[in-house]
Image: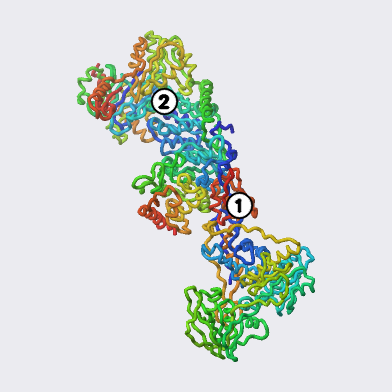
Amino acid sequence: MLKQIEGSAAVAESIALCRPEVVCAYPITPQTHIVEGLGEMVKDGRLSPCEFINVESEFGALSVAIGSSAAGARTYTATSSQGLLFMAEAVYNAAGLGLPIVMTVGNRAIGAPINIWNDHSDSMSMRDAGWIQLYAETNQEAADLHIQAFRLAEELSCPVMVCMDGFILTHAYERVDIPTQEQVDTYLPRFEPRQVLDPAEPVSIGAMVGPEAFMEVRYLAHYKQLRALERIPQLADEFKAGFGRDSGGLIRSYRFEDAETIIVALGSLNGTVKDVVDEMRDAGVKIGCVSIVSFRPFPLAPLRAALERAKRVVVLEKSLAVGLGGIVSDGVRKSLSGIVLKGYTVIAGLGGRAITRSSLRQLFERAGRDELEAVTFLDLRTELVDRELERERHARRTGPTAEALLRDIGTVASRID
Amino acid sequence: MTTQPVKFYQTGTFTVGNRLLDESQRSVQANMERTNSLNSGHRACQGCGEALGARYAIDAAMRAAGNQLVAANATGCLEVFSTPYPETSWQVPWIHSLFGNAAAVASGIAAANRVKGRKGVQVIAQGGDGGTTDIGFGCLSGMFERNDDVLYICYDNEAYMNTGVQRSSATPPAARTATTPAVGKRPGNVAGTGKNLPLIAMAHGIPYVATASVANLHDLEAKVTRAMGISGARYIHIHVPCPLGWGSAPADTIKVARMAVESGLFPLIEAEHGEVVDRAKIRHRVPVDEYLKLQRRFAHLFRPERDTERLAMIQAVADRNIARFGLM
Amino acid sequence: MRKPFAITLDVGSSLANRTGTWRTERPVYLDRLPPCNHACPAGENIQGWLYHAESGDYRRAWEELVQNNPMPAVMGRVCYHPCESACNRGQLDQPVSIHAVERFLGDEAIRRGWAFPQPASESGKRVLIVGAGPSGLSAAYHLRRLGHAVTIHEAGPMTGGMMRFGIPKYRLPRDVLHAEVQRIVDMGVTIKLNAKVDNILDTMRAGGFDAAFLAVGAHLAKRAYIPAGSASRILDAVSVLRGMETAERPQLGRRVVVYGGGNTALDVARTAKRLGAEEAIIVYRRTREKMPAHDFEVQEALEEGILFKWLTTIKQAGETTFTVEKMELDETGFPQPTGELETIEADSLVLALGQDVDLSLLDRVPGLVIEDGVVKVDANMMTGHAGLFAGGDMVPSERTVTVAVGHGKKAARNIDAWLRGARYAPAPKHELASFELLNPWYYTDAPKSVQPMLDILRRQSTFEEVTGGLDEGNALFEARRCLSCGNCFECDNCYGVCPDNAVIKLGPGQRFEFNYEYCKGCGICVSECPCGAIRMEPETI
Amino acid sequence: MFQIRLHGRGGQGVVTGAEMLSVAAFLDGCHAQAFPSFGSERMGAPVMAFCRIDDKEIRLREPVMEPDALIIQDPTLLHQVDLFNGLHANGYILINSTRSFEELGLSEFARDFHHYRLCTVPATELAMKHVRRPLPNAALLGGFAAISGVVKLESVESAIRRKFPGAVGEANVAAAQAAFELVSKDQEVQGAQAD
């Protein structure tokens, strides 16, 4: 059913259709609307049977999820930013224990300085925690990915993180087709846990494993993700058959066949990129783009197939590996191992900095002329940086950088971009 | 002379069993069919109080729950010595997740049991004092305030033993640990620090809080059994000596625990909804010296000379407990 | 369940890890000798019979008791219970009132008519016993149980020896004595009364006996020289007490002086009081503390109004007046005369200065040695003459009923061995279960039960028994005060306190076993065993 | 594609206004996208919300940089924030005020725009009258429907009713209708003047 609906509400409805049995919630912007929506459905009985648990922290949230999942209940939680970091220990643990928890990350920057706006620093920090990470481009896809995520998680006994851009998607109202319960039930079978805490068949879960088997345990986790590389496209196909939509998969390519320049990005940014690609195609530029949906497992082979004929690849990243540059770029380069082409890393949109069509167009045009640095910071306000660097050259006690910069800009919402 | 009913049973209920007592009055541990929830072959040190306390508690819980029990365990000695791959000593469904989240994991299991309609399957969370009073305190407090249907058992050996005896917020005053060494002007742990978790648990107003000791099995089992009969959040804090960390003889584990109780330093109490409802009376009161002298971690209180001031301070703690909880 | 590799494990799999290899010391169960048993002159297994009494099984308790002592009702009354002085419970609150439980069991046996078993088979050997006192009766009982034919020759008109002629009936009612003697007789023991043996070897030959046990006791009163007038009435304690058992009751008068400081002196004074004497005075040359009599008896005597004159000797006896001299103790604690004299009024003087043995029957027995008026015996109670054994008051030892009973048992076992051409070897004794080996915290606090006492007026005027028995409830309570020192009573502590579940409970009455596969040797079981029945022993490496 | 930018202060329902506007467009059969400027949610702080309306899927995620219309819920922002940034000469401006553009000191600024696309409406006054709370967003949407014709008044009414079921919704609908009428009348007057 088509609805003009907030992204968070759409995801909440979609999750409810997956019949989660335990939902843990701890408030953090911008994921709150999702669990609020679910909480209301549990409270008014629309979502039943389901336990909605208000916990004391994100660490508590995922820990409760670990318990309920290990006890055989389909379990969901959501978080963002600092919350994801606060639960980091449990994030690794849930994966290590092979518990098929599904978690939404409403992507948001990480402080300090504290920042509630969107980028991918949070989920990227957990990229190697053993979770499958799927990035949604639209709210429709965010809603759909959650349905696929439960299926995938439970098949593989591996937790899945569905990443959707904070505010840009979570708080955006747009048209979403909410599937029917019947569709979802057909697609997503009952949860049959691989291991369960059951007095009838007791086991000890969470043993201490020493050097004699730890490598093997880790290899098996890796192997599980390699299997996911096969299953994710199959599940997307199956989803299309059942729901009539393309959603998910490993990567999605756009006007790339004859493209000399290909833009690679994750999440909602791809919409704007596509608009720019269309503009430039209209102007005769051979440009295309690829959206990475599955960042973990990382789709090396499909990426290589999509990119190998291009002259250059521009990876647009909403996170920064400080001291290195890009995170996604590393994987993209690895996929192109042995192929000689130009590769550019562009760090964009950190902490909610708007990524505009005009900026992208200029960027892509410069890329087409190969004028980009290996690592470029899109729309970096160099005058602010220079001023601060100058100040630091003259004074030892410069005070906090963030506050100094803010003094120079003025009121936050007084600017459009 | 009219015949009075004979109430004296040689050792009464102080020993584990008593051939003269009715079967129903004997302890779970006396039973040949006891669960041995924590089985032989675990790697706890010789004379480990925690291994003993855990078997006491979980066996009693198993009996109370008709073996319908799931346990969540915090990281720590108990977890490490019981489940090194490829062997586990547990006979109950058991999960270890992290150091600080046992209470939350248990809340999750309880939620799953509720939603799955598994009536009668009870959930226990357990951890050491570090995993309970320090790193796990947030999750524990959350579990308490939500009144989740979980019995949390803390095995208190008064320091981080698994990592090599570092101070925790349950470490008593003057005790030597690796991070409160017995050097300087006032050797050992600083007085006036630390927290009393049973009282904090009571402040949450949860249905049941109790303290217990491996030195008093019947009392311990009665409390576990009682707790298992109550729904909602419950907390039992069990004093379990650690020969390694305390510098006591492995054979003295129970004796040391007994001296803690008999001196008044570890009161055995029961509370319901925040109010103390019962206490175990001290049978043969001893001065705190009798307790402290058994442990090398307090040796500096007696050598090279008697630390009269701090011994008096510790005795005052015991006296206050005795007065406050009516232990005599 | 398709369990994930390594992180999820099958329950109880740690049994594969044999932690027993960690051990440097191993616990072992052992039985230690309880101090009561150790102290009992009759060699009773006190703890053994208390164990059964604890569970209310009095018949088994009694049966266990009479393995060593055939006269518990007597013993429970007259024994000075060294067991209780040794009892570890004394260091906790008060000793277990062993004698009271023993008496209860003895009385219970009489009341219910429990009998001794007949011997399983007859040995065909004949043993002569001379004297039907405690030692002789004890020997007769044990020999009979071993299947030997036993004949007792008793010089006196009644059985019991000193139990009858030395102990007043207010301490040992005669029906009790009779019942316990009769039970021995009922085993098929022949007793010939008024049958004084003049020459032991002749009698043995005449009766065709294979061995003999001499237990004639010490019935000859010791005399002291006291200048006396012809009208002075001076008697000896043996005659007075003996007279109480026969038709001719001794005439002691209104005021009686008893000279001596032993239990017999007290018995005589208390008897005199009961016979109607207005005043009974004990004159003793030393102080109360130095008195050989038991303190509780002195206490009872004082309660009954007996008067004492300490540090006093009798210098001269007149018809109704006696001159006494005050004494004082020198540095060595020995009394020395002071020359200070006084006179006391009395109708009679009874000398209670000890007894000698009548050894006339042993004249010209080859090999037999007599020293200090008693017969020398070896460790097997045999005299220098083969086949001739002796015990009780006529051999060098403490002269108590209990010692005599013990002699009888020991002699019987040696006679039995000798008859079979063997030598009796007693089972080696276990190490002593001293108080330090116990963990008394586990025992319930319980002061001992008090036996009822006859009220003072009746004690002064009648020969009713002074001390009453326990009722069943009290006896059970008292039995359960036993700490079971050194011997497992299956309290399950070791089974419970082992952090490694390395103790196997074998079931009721079967005790426990260590599982050395898993025992790490921590020793908690040893520390927490209430009764000290476990010991750590070094592992051989 | 038609892009609207809404300005106001936290607590005035700016985001809800954008949301209802997108719903109204959705009900008209269009694709629509509404999203806030994502400030921390505090009362009184300047906030923005955006709405895009198109007849095909909207992929663009940038903030509305070049709006076709501005809805200004709080005229006190006029001199505090660069409200008109990116607005092109054919753009619409709807300001919540009892005063005219002239009275607001915008005469000179208004000269660059089609005057019939500029309008003030006393939305807070209408809200106080109908809803009894100073929440001008519904009235402004009514006014916006009148001034722009981008969404139908009926769709705006339905969108309001979806967001606020029951009496509150009806009150807001009444405010929207009143604003619609006021603005329509004003448009007629201005149209007459123009003619």
Q: Position of residue A310 (x, y in %)?
A: 43, 10
Residue B244 appears in view: yes
Which is nearer the eye, C323 or C139?
C323
Residue B203 appears in view: no
Q: Secondary structure at mark 2?
A: helix
Count numbered badges in the picture: 2
Q: Residue A235 got which mark?
A: none
Q: Chain of mark 2?
A: A
> In the displayed image of the protein, which residue is found farthest to the top?
A284
Q: Quadrant of residue A325?
A: top left
Q: Is residue B93 left or right of residue A25?
A: right
Inter-mark Cα distance, 1 to 2: 63 Å
Badge 2: residue crowd in 10 Å (few <14, some 14–19, many ≥20): many
Reading the image, the residue beneath label 2 is A124
Which is nearer the eye, A240 or C160?
C160
Q: Amino acid at mark 1?
A: Tyr
Q: Secondary structure at mark 1?
A: strand
Q: Tell us which disc is closer to us: 1 or 2.
A: 1
In the rendered image, the vertical position of residue A294 relative to residue A72, given as above or below: above
In the rendered image, the vertical position of residue B114 relative to residue A259, given as above or below: below
Q: Quadrant of the C terminus of chain A?
A: top left
Q: Amino acid at mark 2?
A: Met
Which is nearer the eye, D167 or A182?
A182
Q: Is residue A117 left or right of residue C120?
A: left
Q: Chain of mark 1?
A: C
Q: Are marks 1 and 2 in contact (CB under 8 Å)?
A: no
Reading the image, the residue beneath label 1 is C29
Q: Quadrant of residue C72?
A: bottom right
In the rendered image, the vertical position of residue C86 relative to residue A288, given as above or below: below
In the rendered image, the vertical position of residue A136 relative to residue B183, given as above or below: above
